[in-house]
Image (cartoon, helix red, strand yellow):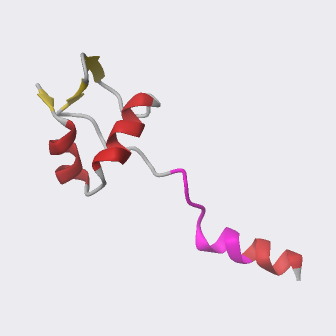
């Protein structure tokens, strides 16, 4: 079974654009691209967001600069 991008956005609480980016980068398992739409496996898990670092590492970086 597959879900649409819109269903994934509601399930994971992220934007439509973010889900499409994750699909195109291959970060979601069980994804197929059919025509102009993505089919995401219902069993697929939301991938970790690697865009942000933890607050501890950011504070450590600030402290090192001072």
Up/down of 60 relative to 44, above or below: below
Q: Nearer the viewer, residue 40 or 15?
A: 15
Q: Position of residue 15 (x, y in %)?
A: 30, 53
Q: In this rendering, would 60 be left or right of 14?
A: right
Res. 63 image quadrant: bottom right
Q: Residue furthest front?
A: 36
Q: In this rendering, would 13 be left or right of 54?
A: left
Specify the quadrant that holds the N terminus: top left
Q: Position of residue 40 (x, y in %)?
A: 23, 30
Q: Nearer the viewer, residue 54 or 14?
A: 14
Is residue 6 within the magenta segment?
no
Residue found at x 69% / y 68%: 57
Residue extent of the magenta highlight: 50-59
Residue found at x 24% / y 16%: 35
Residue found at x 68% / y 71%: 58
| Labels in figure, total | 0
Q: Position of residue 18 (x, y in %)?
A: 37, 47
Up/down of 56 relative to 6, above or below: below
Specify the quadrant that holds the C terminus: bottom right
Q: Residue furthest top?
A: 35
Up/down of 65 relative to 26, above or below: below
Q: Position of residue 24 (x, y in %)?
A: 42, 29
Residue found at x 35% / y 28%: 29
Q: Nearer the viewer, residue 46 or 13?
A: 13
Q: Residue furthest left?
A: 1
Is residue 51 within the magenta segment?
yes
Q: In this rendering, would 38 be left or right of 2?
A: right
């Amino acid at each position: 079974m597959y879900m649409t991008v819109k269903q994934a956005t509601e399930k994971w609480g992220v934007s439509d654009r973010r889900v499409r980016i994750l699909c195109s980068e291959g970060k979601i398992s069980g994804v197929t691209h059919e025509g102009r739409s993505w089919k995401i496996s219902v069993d697929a898990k939301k991938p970790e967001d690697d865009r942000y670092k933890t607050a501890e590492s950011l504070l450590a970086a600030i402290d090192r600069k001072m």
